[in-house]
Amino acid sequence: MNWKFWKKESQNEPSAANGPKLAKPKELPEPVGRKMVTVMKLDPDLVWSLKYVSRPMGDRRNASEFRIFNPETAHMKGVTVKNWTSLDDLPDLILYSGSYDKSANSIEIH
């Protein structure tokens, strides 16, 4: 075993200084799902089966941008969605995008 805990890790390792850590796919926040069902008149069963990935919006602490996708479609195409950047090259998997501000309780869906 190589337990040299007193030595620093190599500089090639990603760290928090290289940028913010992006979140893994999650269930839709309740206010976002509710808006999709009530305002956009989407099927509730479909809406609550969707997942989203997000990234923080620069200057606002409680605000984030999100991308909503269908995990079943991604799985059928052989794509593993790990975070926000996983969908950069696959715009056809993104069903909706928008922003969500928890403190102001504002939701924008495009």
Image (cartoon, grey):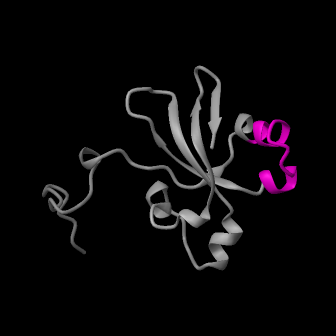
Q: Quadrant of the N terminus?
A: bottom left
* Image location of residue 71, percent across then percent down: 67, 65
Which residues are the magenta region?
33-47
| Dominant secondary-structure state across the stretch colored magenta | helix
**Seen in the image, is 85 located left or right of residue 33?**
left
* Image location of residue 45, percent across then percent down: 86, 55
Task: Name the residue rendered at 68%, 40% in the picture.
Answer: 29
Q: Eyeballing the image, is 26 above or below 40? A: below
- In this rendered view, identify the residue nearer to me: 108 or 44: 108
Residue 24 among those drawn in magenta: no
Task: Name the residue rendered at 24%, 45% in the picture.
Answer: 17
Q: Quadrant of the C terminus?
A: top right
Task: Name the residue rendered at 60%, 65% in the picture.
Answer: 93
Q: How many marks?
A: 0
* Image location of residue 94, percent across then percent down: 60, 59
Q: Eyeballing the image, is 63 above or below 70? A: above
